[in-house]
Image (cartoon, rainbow, N blue to C red):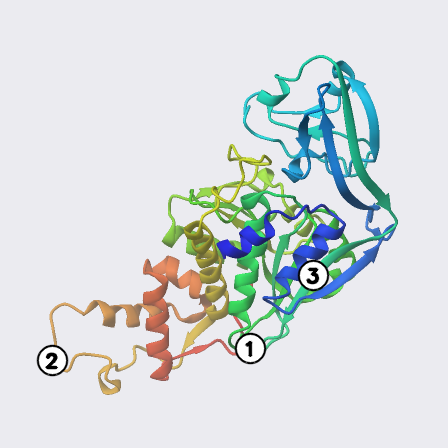
Amino acid sequence: MHALLRKLFPICRSITGPGVRETLSILREHVPLSIYEVPTGAQAFDWEVPKEWRVREAYIDAPDGSRVVDFKDNNLHVVGYSIPVDAVLSLADLQSNLHSLPELPEAIPYVTSYYRETWGFCLAHKKRMRLKEGRYRVVIDSELISGSLTYGELIIPGSTDSEIFISTYICHPSMANNELSGPVVTTMLAKWLLSSPRKFTYRIVFIPETIGALVYLSRNLPEMKRKTRAGLNVTCIGDDRVYSFVPSRKGGTLADRAALCVLREDHPDFIEYSYLDRGSDERQYCSPGIDLPVVSVMRSKYREYPEYHTSLDDCELVTPSGLFGGYSVLKRAIELLERNEFYETTCLGEPQLGKRGLYPTIGRRITLPAVRLLLDILAYADGSNDLIDLKSILGVSLDELYQGVETLSRAGLLRPQAGGSGESD
């Protein structure tokens, strides 16, 4: 995963343009994405697809002719969607188009202006403070054209039409955790999901954040409202810090319950945020009238770690172990969604376990823990409790619960509720 992240890292991405297409082309080498182009001006609810932005070169030359800022060195140096400029300015006039972070003097900030035409450069504050008086040559070789917005989609059919929705974004330049950890982990999840048959159908999208989510919803919302049972927004999932969780707007959905079940068991030190702390595409997926059951499971949450939206969010911050840990948590949540059912016992009264080889032939004063678990599962298998409920009631691990349910199912003592599929919110 980390090798793929490093390959994608140098690409200059934005909400439109060649960087998005190049990123999707590389991801397509790993999973069979369908690529869609939506033209400039296309309506998406209250928004419309903006002009496509392309940037080829950008730099600032100092009065002595030295190059003090160069897009080729770091693509964060240019304000996203900067219009073309070729001018000679005094330092005083240039300052209004410079962006830096006094609190992080070594970092280049990430700044955009998608919907208001302007231009600008970003640089480390310590370098900005060393700029000397004089005339500076500023050049941004860019264009805003009638083009298109690009996104990728992968539909993995399951045995049912009910869907699990997975979304990640591909619209930021060279930042590792906030940008690339999501697409990389999602790609690996997609490869795993493609490896064997599944109960649910999986709808997986790689989109530009905000405008891409709105465009996708505007094209697919009726079908998604009918079919989506749970959704995951995948972002900021690659560092080695504590896990974070942002719920759906309403909370209590199957997605909320499954994610929290896994986090509480495997990573009890995780930080549980409110939906009021939202900031990624859960804003669109959970908005009133759309109301999809989508949650975000992260490592360091966007806006909450010091390197966020700066050049310090690099390939050293995101680690192989961080990426694998994030992948494992999401994989475990999906496994729970796949296995979740409302179970009911097949017999009246407590069954005779001994004749089925599930009870010791010699009586003991203390019931064995494994036997007790089987009896406890049956005690609450009345069709009103799914696996997530049973775990909470019985206080056992998911693996213990899975094993107990499998044992009872093989013995013919437990079955999924007739007509149920574990999909209820």
Q: Nearer the viewer, residue 288 or 418?
A: 288
Residue position marked by numbered label 1 in the rendering: 419
Q: Secondary structure at mark 3?
A: strand
Q: Secondary structure at mark 2?
A: loop
Residue type at numbered disc 2: Ile
Q: Residue at horizontal 38%, vertical 61%?
A: 391
Crowd around label 2: few <14 · some 14–19 · many ≥20 (10 Å) = few
Q: Secondary structure at mark 1?
A: loop
Give coordinates of residue 344: x percent, y percent: 43, 75
Q: Earlier in the sequence, mark 3 or mark 2?
A: 3
Q: Quadrant of residue 279?
A: top right
Q: Residue at horizontal 67%, vertical 66%?
A: 33
Is residue 262 shown above or below 358?
above
Residue position marked by numbered label 3 in the rendering: 152
Give coordinates of residue 211: x percent, y percent: 75, 48
Give coordinates of residue 310: x percent, y percent: 58, 34
Kindly report which numbered mark, 3 or 2, lies closer to the viewer in this rendering.
3
Residue position marked by numbered label 2 in the rendering: 362
- Give the tally of numbered discs: 3
Residue 142 relative to residue 179: left or right: right
Q: Earlier in the sequence, mark 1 or mark 3?
A: 3
Residue type at numbered disc 3: Gly
The answer to the question of whether label 3 and label 2 lie on touching residues, with beta carbons closer than 8 A, is: no
User: Quick check: can you spot residue 251?
Assistant: no
Q: Earlier in the sequence, mark 2 or mark 1?
A: 2
